[in-house]
């Protein structure tokens, strides 16, 4: 079993109270030796990003319509498999990434949050080792397709109306 990342089966979510409140957990991890938690969840119409003290009320909650959330699926090539989701609070973006190296001999799980303001990174938080919980399985891609959106193939194209 890979160290550094926990996979949640498609359509299921981790059995935590935070995940139960938000629907299907897509990504989560802790920071500062478990003191803080970040989580991205999918519900009927929203992607919800939360960040704050583990087990306490979050310091930040951002709800973003599924149609407008910036989601970048794995391209299908490269040494690692990853996904990135960006939610915005005004001009500040919170880009959460989770992935793993394809080489089974490596301690391969990784994740973190890039905090960006006006397009420039102002902070980067690296997930605690072994805390990453990632529901790789295209839950968010399916939700976007259900709303008539298809991945254009590049970050520049993004999600476009399906033909």
Image (cartoon, rainbow, N blue to C red):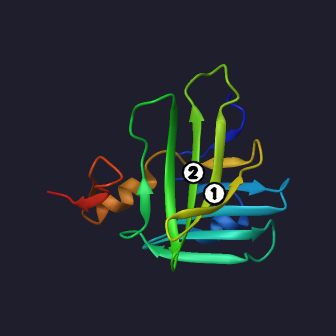
Tell me where residue 109 appears, x and y as whole percent. Answer: 65, 37
Q: Secondary structure at mark 2?
A: strand
Q: Which mark is residue 97?
A: 2
Name which quarter of the figure residue 13 lies in.
Answer: bottom right
Viewer-nearest residue: 146 or 96: 96
Position above or below: 162 against 43: above
Horizontally, residue 115 falls left or right of residue 81, namely right
Q: Mark 1 = which residue?
A: 113
Residue at 76% x, 77% y: name it. Answer: 57
Q: Are marks 1 and 2 in contact (CB under 8 Å)?
A: yes
Residue at 57% x, 51% y: name it. Answer: 97
**Mark 1 crowdedness (10 Å alpha carbons): few <14, some 14-19, many ≥20:** many
Horizontally, residue 152 falls left or right of residue 132, namely left
Quarter containing the C terminus: bottom left
Most extreme residue toward the bottom, as rendered? 90
Most extreme residue toward the left, as rendered? 163
Tell me where residue 107 appears, x and y as whole percent. Answer: 70, 29
């Amino acid at each position: 079993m890979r160290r550094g990342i926990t996979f949640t089966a498609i359509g299921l979510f981790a059995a935590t109270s935070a995940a139960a409140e938000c629907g299907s957990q897509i990504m989560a991890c802790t920071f500062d030796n478990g003191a803080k938690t970040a989580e991205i969840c999918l519900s009927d119409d929203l992607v919800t990003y939360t960040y704050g003290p583990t087990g306490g009320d979050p310091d930040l909650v951002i709800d973003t319509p599924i149609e407008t959330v910036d989601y970048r699926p794995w391209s299908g090539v490269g040494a690692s498999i990853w996904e990135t989701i960006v939610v915005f609070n005004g001009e500040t973006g919170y880009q959460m990434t989770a992935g793993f190296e394809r080489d089974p001999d490596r301690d391969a799980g990784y994740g973190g949050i890039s905090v960006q303001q006006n397009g420039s990174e102002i902070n980067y938080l690296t997930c605690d080792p072994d805390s990453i919980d990632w529901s790789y399985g295209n839950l968010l891609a399916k939700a976007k397709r259900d709303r008539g959106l298809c991945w254009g193939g590049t970050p520049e194209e993004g999600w476009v109306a399906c033909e």
